[in-house]
Amino acid sequence: MSATATIGVINISDRASQGVYEDIPGKACVDLLNEWILTSFQVEYAVVPDEKDQIEATLIDFCDNRNCSLVVTTGGTGPAVRDITPEATEAVCEKMLAGFGEEMRRASLQFVPTAILSRQTAGIRGHALIVNLPGKPKAIRENLEAVFPAIPYCIDLIGGSYLETNPSVMKVFRPKNT
């Protein structure tokens, strides 16, 4: 993998992709990553509509062509008819990591009883970890805080770029070499 990490952020929203409203969720996600990660990284960024083929194509491009070690999506994880981000993610991943979705829903239940309607998930494509997040900035923070401690080590295990975080704001887990 390259010396500088590459992280993909994809906001999945019909209205934001059409310019009806500003892409606040994707920007909130980038702000969190900048707050937590010390490693030098570049961001690949996209806003796409809730169309399965476009989501899949963007995920594949970010993982296979743009060398992202981490791709986070925002939006499209609910039960509404147009919410198909998890299906697109599952279609492009070699392995699914159900624990990510379980932990995000558990964490969200502390704040809202409707967390059980969420369908966040995560999976691996090549050397990239893809994590689906909800579309509201507050929920993005709550969900990503719950699972981020495991993300850098997961990326280590799949051969992605090494991510170091600022331990005063985000402590991650890596086993100690003994």
Image (tube, rainbow, N blue to C red):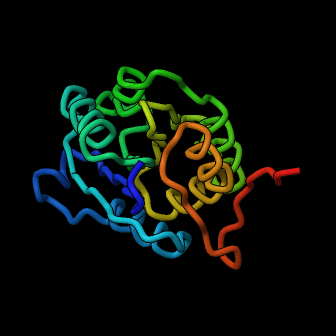
Q: Position of residue 21 (x, y in %)?
A: 19, 62
Single out the residue that lies furthest toward the right.
178
Foreground: 103 or 164?
164
From this view, report whether residue 175 is shown above or below residue 55.
below
Q: Kindly tell me whether residue 142 is visible in this rendering.
A: yes
Foreground: 8 or 4?
4
Picture quadrant of residue 172: bottom right
Single out the residue that lies furthest toward the left.
18
Q: Position of residue 101 (x, y in %)?
A: 60, 36
Picture quadrant of residue 136: bottom left
| Number of marks in the rendered image | 0
107 horizontally vs 56: left or right:
right
172 horizontally vs 130: left or right:
right
Which residue is located at x 39 percent, y 29 percent? 89
Q: Kindly tell me whether residue 108 is visible in this rendering.
A: no
Q: Position of residue 135 (x, y in %)?
A: 40, 52
Q: Position of residue 41 (x, y in %)?
A: 40, 66
Picture quadrant of residue 44: bottom left
Which residue is located at x 32 percent, y 27 percent? 81
Single out the residue that lies furthest toward the bottom.
168
Foreground: 79 or 145?
145
Which residue is located at x 18 percent, y 51 percent? 15
From this view, report whether residue 151 is shown above or below residue 93.
below
Which residue is located at x 42 percent, y 23 percent? 90
